[in-house]
Image (cartoon, coloured by chain):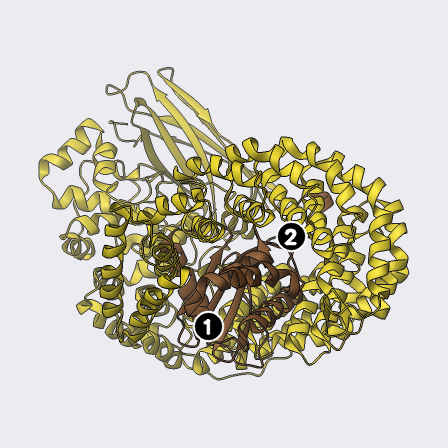
């Protein structure tokens, strides 16, 4: 689905989790995160969840004090037979964010900012089970959480 | 090693960072942590490696450099245990990228882990490989990944499928190896495997035509069936999202079908039924359902035509568009853009709704809607749509005005049915959002205005009204100032009234007020003020009675800190005060600007060089915008450059002035030189060619000013030009009594010197009671023997001469070449003239002077007339 990054940002605009599926230098990341956060956090509840920024289309959703932002391609592949294949389905990405939050909820039990901060690696493991190289791997919460729960039991 | 032992310290660090009040404190904490991690790295500390890497990940997320931790990742990956490997691979994916050399070192570990007996370790390695692998790694490890596509555990197969996507993207020749395994994966039941296999399949289709053909034939039916099952499946809790069975899978299926059905009637036919089923059966009250519908619509629009389905799709979009949820409206607008190319008519039906979306409070929706409206505008609806957009411009957000203005201007320029409408709409836009209008837009407007000669009066009056209300919009002010300068006289007398227009009463002083206001506004920038000065100069000639007031206003800029304004002000002041008689010619109306050339230049197709020789007229407006440093040059150049208007060539006259002036005010030796060596032109050219364009077209007016730019004595030069004293015109035996009072002689004695005139004043070659001939001379510097003569015939009688023919004969030492005359009808009472060029080569140059016999024949009231004469008063040095 051409996901290019997943960000979790709190109300103050501090990054709580960042996973990029393309290489950006530290400076580029910092600049990008700053711009996106300024743009998205300024919007109100009634406005739609999509923001176009540079070559990205950002789909975001707010859960309590935490913003989940997913950047997808805003450009289309222009080969004759691939008519709009890369064009993202914004609604599906929105659904994906919800799935991510539900999965974290199931694991942490009502996930909050601190859970993600103090269990950053676990949050990453979950994301890793869901997205790989910008594509969605798995949409079943049980399948996503199985390896993580196995690990927790083992230790 | 106990993973919990590391957890406490990680927690401490995070707490310490959270407790930081300022960025400086945070940096201090991070620096301290990094120092201790570095120390641990160099001690090769095994116990805390795991914990240190976790810390580094956190530090990296905060945006600090963590490159020193990269080798730690490799060590952890090489460790035997799963927990170490897991954090090692995670660190690898976060901290490294495929550009780094370190990556080469990990290939071997990856290979081992891909062959590991523990499926979770295999999964880790696949995931890492899928996220970061480089082309070399892809080649090395492709066989392992291919094998894993058939692994017993579906969780490994799905990861192997996604890993394959990266591999084939890095190394496209590997595509064929994956085609068969994917075909079998597409038959699986496991959702994860299906989902990933379809993504791989889609990527293979993009990369290879053969793969696409293969999948079209072999898999379309199977996928259609999978989709059918998904749509009709009973409740499956694990994949259910708000009552819909695995929307992600359905979306993926629709997406792949889109690729397979595009451009293939058979495949499209095969999926028609199921698409209709998805489009009708999917619940649209939840986001997940809408996501599927959205995808389905796109698939229907992309595959081969099936009328019924398309109607269904467009209807769904219509429903989306009227949805209250902004997200749904946004995607509807998005999709309607694509639908335009498929069924423009159907999209046009939603025009009103789309137009409403342009006015939405949400910036994302507005942007989409505006782009869509832009695509929807055509000849038939341009008027109402533009009206709506312009009306909205009034109330729109500041940050949206830029986009909106650009679109409106583009629509108006592209589709305006007539010039009146164009000018009207542009004026409205300028009034509302003049500060957002790009320079080329108002330049284009001026081009259009100059071309619409019947609308000059209307335009200048409208602008006069507009500037009263929208004085804060820079672009309005500029265009208005320009037009009032050009067409100020039309403002007074209501010339060219249109039916729809209300007459207004404007006095000269009102018009000057407007410009005065503009030049004095503190927000006006250099360009605007420079334009104001030029407009004032022009008005001083158009409104003689306000001349003194205009002079006062111009004088006020003498103290400007901006050199350009100061200089122009001084120059213009001097022109207004001392050069009454040439001012009118100087500030004539601009010639009509060529629309085609301008639009060509705008699109960049005409090389800039063209403008130098042919016409600075192309510089818009008055050249101010393009050459802000020399607006006057262009202005003067333009007014002089007016084609085929020998009577109005004030510039030529000025050139004479300058020649005379230089010879009189500079040392005698210079003037002697001019006379003696006939190199006067060269000297002059040197003197003149200090600035701007080369004086190719013989008008040196700009050069006067370019001299003045370099030479601060220009003012005195101008002053001396205007001094009543007749400059001595040396040694030119003038007959015919043409008083070469260079300034005051302008009126009665239409001077038509051309080219390098200054060295050789014109003479009256022949004069009778009915006819006068004036010769203007010029020399080609490289051949002193050749003289170019431009003969100028004027009719002193009160009757028109027709069939006018001029003939000449010369002695043997001369060669004469006569060029065609400019006409054969000579208007009466000196109201017009005929010019004809003669090229004379003097073989005894310097010894004998040019002489000739002439014969002029013409018809007067149908009667043949003949006049003969001899010309022997041509200066010897020619």
**Horizontal side, residue B186 vs residue B359: left or right:** right
**Classed neighbour count for the residue bearing mark 2: other residues with Cα under 10 Å, few (<14), some (14–19), many (≥20):** some
Chain B image colour = yellow
- Quadrant where the image shows the N terminus of chain B: bottom left
Asked if residue B348 is positioned above or below residue B47 in the image, the reply reads: below
Report helix, strand or loop for mark 2.
loop
Residue sitting at x 11%, y 43%: B666
- For marks 1 and 2, give the one nearer the viewer: 1
**Horizontal side, residue B379 vs residue B133: left or right:** right
**Picture quarter containing residue B145?**
top right
**Classed neighbour count for the residue bearing mark 1: other residues with Cα under 10 Å, few (<14), some (14–19), many (≥20):** some
Report helix, strand or loop for mark 1.
helix
In the picture, which chain is brown?
A
The answer to whether residue B475 is seen in the rendering is no
In this view, the residue in front, B389 or A142, is: A142
Asked if residue B349 is positioned above or below residue B802 in the image, the reply reads: below
Q: Position of residue B542 (x, y in %)?
A: 39, 69
Q: Same chain for marks 1 and 2?
A: yes
Q: Are marks 1 and 2 in contact (CB under 8 Å)?
A: no
Q: Which residue corresponds to mark 1? A: A115
Q: Position of residue B817 (x, y in %)?
A: 45, 24
What is the total number of numbered labels drawn onto the structure image?
2
**Picture quarter containing residue B104?**
top left
Q: Position of residue B403 (x, y in %)?
A: 52, 67
Q: Which residue corresponds to mark 2? A: A86
State which tag comes first along the sequence, 1 or 2: 2
């Amino acid at each position: 689905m051409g996901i290019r990054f997943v960000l979790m940002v709190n109300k103050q605009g501090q990054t709580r989790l960042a996973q990029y599926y393309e290489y950006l230098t530290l400076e580029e990341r910092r600049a990008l995160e700053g711009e996106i956060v300024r743009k998205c956090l300024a919007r109100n509840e009634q406005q739609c969840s999509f923001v176009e920024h540079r070559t990205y289309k950002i789909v975001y959703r707010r859960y309590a004090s935490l913003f989940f932002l997913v950047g997808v391609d805003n450009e289309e592949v222009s080969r004759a037979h691939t008519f709009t294949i890369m064009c993202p389905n914004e609604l599906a990405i929105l659904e994906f964010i919800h799935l991510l939050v539900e999965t974290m909820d199931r694991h942490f039990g009502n996930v909050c900012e601190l859970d993600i901060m103090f269990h950053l690696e676990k949050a990453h493991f979950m994301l890793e089970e869901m997205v790989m190289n910008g594509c969605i791997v798995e949409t079943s919460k049980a399948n996503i959480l199985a390896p993580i729960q196995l690990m927790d039991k083992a230790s | 090693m106990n993973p919990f032992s590391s957890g406490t310290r990680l927690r401490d660090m995070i707490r310490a960072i959270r407790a930081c009040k300022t960025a400086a404190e945070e940096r201090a904490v991070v620096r301290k942590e990094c120092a201790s991690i570095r120390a641990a790295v160099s001690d090769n500390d095994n116990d805390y490696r795991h914990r240190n890497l976790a810390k580094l990940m956190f530090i990296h997320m905060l945006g600090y450099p963590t490159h020193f931790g990269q080798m730690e990742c490799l060590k952890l990956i090489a460790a035997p245990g799963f927990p170490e490997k897991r954090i090692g691979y995670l660190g690898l994916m976060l901290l490294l990228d495929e550009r780094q050399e370190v990556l080469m070192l990990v290939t071997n570990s990856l290979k081992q882990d891909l062959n590991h007996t523990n499926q979770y370790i295999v999964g880790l390695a696949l995931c890492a490989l899928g996220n970061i692998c480089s082309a070399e790694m892809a080649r090395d490890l492709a066989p392992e990944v291919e094998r894993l596509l058939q692994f017993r555990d579906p969780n490994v197969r799905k990861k192997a499928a996604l890993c394959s996507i990266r591999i084939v993207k890095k190394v496209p020749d590997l595509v064929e190896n994956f085609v068969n395994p994917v075909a079998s994966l597409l038959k699986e039941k496991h959702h994860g495997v299906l989902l990933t296999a379809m993504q791989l399949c889609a990527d293979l289709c993009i990369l290879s035509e053969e793969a696409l053909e293969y999948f079209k034939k072999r898999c379309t039916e199977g996928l259609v069936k999978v989709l059918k099952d998904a749509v009709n499946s009973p409740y499956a809790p694990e994949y259910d999202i708000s009552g819909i069975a695995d929307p992600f899978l359905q979306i993926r299926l629709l997406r792949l079908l889109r690729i397979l059905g595009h451009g293939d009637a058979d495949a499209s036919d095969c999926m028609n039924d199921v698409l209709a089923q998805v489009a009708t059966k999917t619940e649209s009250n939840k986001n997940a359902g809408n996501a599927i519908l959205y995808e389905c619509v796109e698939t229907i629009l992309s595959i081969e035509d099936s009328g019924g389905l398309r109607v269904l799709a467009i209807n769904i979009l219509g429903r989306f568009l009227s949805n209250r949820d902004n997200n749904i409206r946004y995607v509807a607008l998005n999709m309607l853009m694509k639908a335009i190319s498929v069924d423009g008519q159907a999209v046009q039906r939603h025009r009103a709704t789309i137009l409403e979306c342009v006015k939405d409070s949400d910036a994302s929706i507005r942007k989409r809607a505006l782009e869509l409206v832009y695509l929807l505008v055509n000849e038939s609806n341009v008027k109402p749509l533009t009206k709506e957009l312009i009306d909205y411009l009034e109330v729109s957000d500041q940050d949206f005005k830029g986009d909106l203005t650009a679109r409106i201007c583009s629509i108006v320029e592209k589709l305006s049915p007539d010039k009146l409408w164009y000018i009207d709409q542009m004026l409205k836009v300028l009034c509302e959002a003049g500060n957002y209008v790009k320079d080329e837009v108002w330049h284009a407007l001026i081009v259009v205005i100059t071309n619409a000669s019947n609308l000059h009066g209307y335009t200048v009056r409208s602008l006069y009204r507009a500037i009263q209300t929208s004085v804060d919009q820079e672009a309005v002010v500029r265009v208005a100032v320009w037009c009032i300068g050009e067409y100020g006289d039309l403002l007074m007398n209501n010339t060219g009234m249109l039916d729809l227009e209300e007459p207004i009463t404007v006095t000269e002083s009102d018009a000057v007020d407007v410009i005065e206001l503009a030049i004095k506004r503190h927000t006006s920038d250099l360009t605007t003020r420079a334009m104001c000065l030029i407009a004032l100069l022009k008005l001083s000639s158009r409104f003689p009675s306000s001349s003194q007031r205009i002079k006062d206003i111009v004088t006020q800029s003498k103290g400007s800190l901006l050199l350009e304004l100061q200089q122009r002000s001084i120059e213009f002041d001097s022109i207004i005060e001392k050069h009454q008689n040439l001012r009118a010619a100087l500030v004539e109306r601009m010639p009509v600007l060529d629309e085609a050339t301008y639009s060509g230049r705008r699109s960049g197709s005409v090389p800039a060089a063209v403008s130098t020789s042919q016409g600075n007229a192309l510089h818009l407006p008055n050249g101010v915008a393009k050459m802000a440093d020399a607006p006057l040059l262009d202005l003067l150049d333009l007014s002089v450059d007016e084609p085929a208007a020998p009577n109005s060539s004030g510039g030529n006259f000025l050139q004479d002035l300058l020649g005379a002036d230089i010879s009189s005010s500079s040392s005698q030796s210079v003037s002697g030189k001019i006379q003696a060596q006939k190199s006067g032109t060269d000297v002059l050219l040197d003197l003149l060619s200090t600035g701007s364009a080369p004086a190719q077209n013989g008008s040196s007016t700009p050069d006067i000013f370019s001299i003045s730019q370099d030479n601060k004595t220009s003012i005195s030069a101008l002053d001396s030009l205007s001094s009543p004293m007749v400059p001595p015109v040396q040694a030119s035996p003038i007959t015919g009594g043409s008083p070469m009072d260079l300034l005051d002689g302008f009126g009665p004695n239409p001077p038509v010197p051309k080219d390098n005139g200054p060295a050789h004043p014109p003479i009256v070659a022949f004069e009778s009671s009915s006819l006068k001939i004036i010769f203007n001379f010029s020399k080609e510097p490289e051949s002193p023997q050749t003289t170019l003569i431009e003969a100028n015939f004027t009719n002193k009688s009160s009757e028109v001469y027709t069939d006018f023919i001029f003939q000449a004969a010369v002695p043997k030492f001369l060669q004469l070449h006569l060029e065609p005359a400019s006409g054969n009808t000579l208007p009466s009472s000196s109201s017009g003239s005929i010019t004809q060029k003669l090229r004379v080569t003097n073989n005894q140059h310097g010894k004998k002077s040019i002489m000739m016999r002439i014969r002029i024949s013409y018809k007067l009231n149908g009667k043949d007339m003949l006049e003969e004469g001899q010309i022997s008063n041509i200066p010897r040095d020619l």
